[in-house]
Image (cartoon, coloured by chain):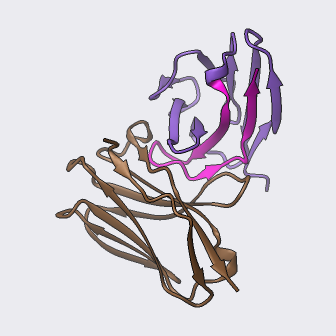
Chain colours: A brown, B purple
Amino acid sequence: QKEVEQDPGPLSVPEGAIVSLNCTYSNSAFQYFMWYRQYSRKGPELLMYTYSSGNKEDGRFTAQVDKSSKYISLFIRDSQPSDSATYLCAMSAGSSASKIIFGSGTRLSIRP
Amino acid sequence: NAGVTQTPKFQVLKTGQSMTLQCAQDMNHNSMYWYRQDPGMGLRLIYYSASEGTTDKGEVPNGYNVSRLNKREFSLRLESAAPSQTSVYFCASSIGGGQPQHFGDGTRLSIL
């Protein structure tokens, strides 16, 4: 069983919809959580970073961490075709990048 | 401002050949990383350099070597390429030693 599980999709939603992307994990020591966006044939870009539990909001994006359920989510409000990409979750127990575990990504498509 | 630049973008090698992947960043970041991305497996850390003059192994270092030439440049060398090293390689950087913040657009490497 992988430490970090992420549904590969593809997930297709109409423009303007609220998108929910999720990851589950098995290591209860994880306390740093990240979301990256990766456009086709490009490198990932860091979208959101949260420490421990709770919510963090940045524009149309909200990251949510539920440590009791070992579950993290990324919500995208008012989704746009430009949000079509693969979204990677990542997490670690410590602050060093050497300990970060990445999910395999969910491919998202926003239909105009 | 170029960010993280990787060369080459594509390469085909024969088994047993050697090559060096180049990476340079112009953001004055201290830490640099090399990842590989394979279908269904997420990003995996090969090597990282927390600061100029230091390098450390990541999750999958076998078959690779690295050099932190200066603060800007971090190269990855395959001494004797194997088909299992066919992958997309990403270089990344960050200000400190935490999560990678900026990625290059990758080198697509195929080993026959």
- For the C terminus of chain A, the image quarter is bottom right
- Taking the image as shown, residue A65 lies to the left or right of residue B15, namely left
Q: Is residue B75 above or below residue B102?
A: above
Q: Quadrant of residue A55?
A: bottom left
- Residue A45 in the image: above or below residue B67: below
Depth check: give the residue in front, A55 or A77: A77
Say above or below: B99 vs B90: below
Q: Position of residue B110 (x, y in %)?
A: 75, 29
Magenta span = B85-112
Q: Is residue B55 visible?
A: yes
- Front-lying residue, B64 or B30: B64
User: What residue lies at 67% left-to-right and 28% top-to-bottom?
Assistant: B86
B32 part of magenta stretch? no
Marker count (numbered): 0
Q: Position of residue B108 (x, y in %)?
A: 75, 37
The spot of residue A72 in percent (x, y) is: 34, 65
Work out whether residue B72 or residue B107 is closer to the camera in this orientation and state it: B107
Give me the residue at 34% from left, 43% from top. A2
Which quadrant is home to the N terminus of chain A?
top left
> Image quarter for residue B79?
top right
Picture quadrant where residue A101 is located:
top left
Residue B8 visible, this angle? no
- Tell whether position B98 is magenta: yes
| Residue A78 image point, x, y percent | 56, 89
Q: Residue B102, relative to residue B36: is it above or below?
A: below
At 52% across and 45% down in the image, what residue appears? Answer: B40
Foreground residue among B61 and B74: B61
